[in-house]
Image: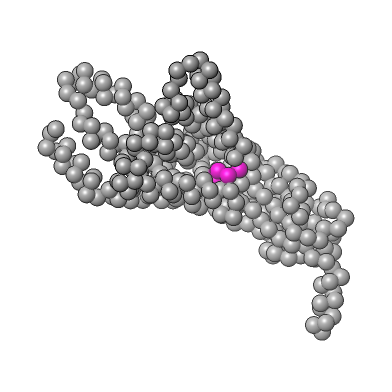
Amino acid sequence: MPIYVQRIIELIKRYPGVIALFGFISGIGSFILVDRQEKLASWIAVLMLVSWVWLMLENSFTKLFSRVFKRDIPEPLLRYATQMIHQESLFFVLPFFYITTTWNSGQLVFTGLLTVAGLISIIDPLYYKWLAPRRWLFLALHTLTLFAAMLTALPIILHLTTSQSFKLALITAMLLSFPSLASSFPIAHWRRGVMLVVMTLAVGAGGWLLRSWVPPATLWLTEVAVSTEMDNANRTPGKRLKEISASQVRSTGLYAYTAINAPRGLDERIYHVWQFNGKEVDRIALDIHGGRKEGYRAWTHKQNLPGDPVGKWQVRVLTEDGQVIGVLRFEVTDTGQETRQAARTN
């Protein structure tokens, strides 16, 4: 092995956290650049996905290299290159998912898994002695990492909607899960092959059913408000409310205002889903456009309220496929109760 290659490997062994730190810094940098609509974020995302193309074609590349240059690429270098791509990708996407996760929902599980995967990737004893020997588990981490990377990069690079990015990333995850399952359950009979196909489809179906648990990596709320007034000219809400009387709701209705940050060039359909005491009562579609520094400002006005609107209300902001961008919560109180409380105060 060339001496300079040995030195590189030794440096990586000695400072394993440097690569992860670089990935995290580049992720924060890309997050800031997306927020400011800079094209450089696209180039960072492209470089990250190119590294994944290399990783997926690693075996073909190494064989070609050996045939052309008559020498093998050192195995430790390949091993650390794989680890580096996992570290870079995981710590690149984590800033996006941290800011877009609705923490009091199932999205906590997905972002938590990414965090655990990131920690495993920088702790060598866990990565090499616990994870790598378990081929199915190693490929599961590989698949999860690529899935998260595609969810983050595709809207930035190709301006695909969150729905399109999720479907493409899920199909890729299904294809990658097949060799993982095949390594755990070798195909010795045609029935085993059919079972593997069914299990792969089950992975895809599970991912689709749990899509609300996956944060929309490049969409996040920059401002929200529930109000009885809206300044249409300046696109700003009136007084922000957490509680409102039933009489006031009946007379003016309610506005749900959201400013949503999205990458430049991205056109996305979202929904304001109004819920009353946990039940959906209205679903209103909104088309948003990325690239605005303050976020795309949109609102819905609800006037057709139930006969008795007193209770807990939510406006859930969802993508077309049901991923949660954020939730606005407020309460409608009884008018008579408010009057009695005011009288007692006086």
Q: Nearer the viewer, residue 131 or 298?
A: 131
Q: Residue at x 45, y 19 (%)?
A: 187
Q: Is residue 191 above or below residue 127?
A: above
Residue 99 in the image: state x and y as whole percent.
50, 52
Asked which quadrant contains residue 70, the reply is: top left
Farthest-out residue, left: 3
Residue 293 in the image: state x and y as whole percent.
52, 51
Q: Which residue is drawn at 26% across and 21% down?
A: 63
Q: Which residue is drawn at 53% across and 27% down?
A: 200
Q: Nearer the viewer, residue 23 or 235?
A: 23
Left or right of 34, for residue 56: left
Type of colouring: one colour
Left or right of 167, for residue 29: left
Asked which quadrant contains residue 186, the reply is: top left
Q: In this view, does 136 lie above or below 292?
A: above
Left or right of 1, for residue 275: right
Residue 25 in the image: state x and y as whole percent.
36, 51
The span shown in magenta is: 212-216
Position of the N terminus, as image quadrant, is: top left
Q: Residue at x 34, y 25 (%)?
A: 57
Q: In this view, does 86 lie above or below 345?
A: above
Q: Is residue 283 magenta?
A: no
Q: Nearer the viewer, residue 340 or 58?
A: 58
Q: Does the magenta stretch include residue 213?
A: yes
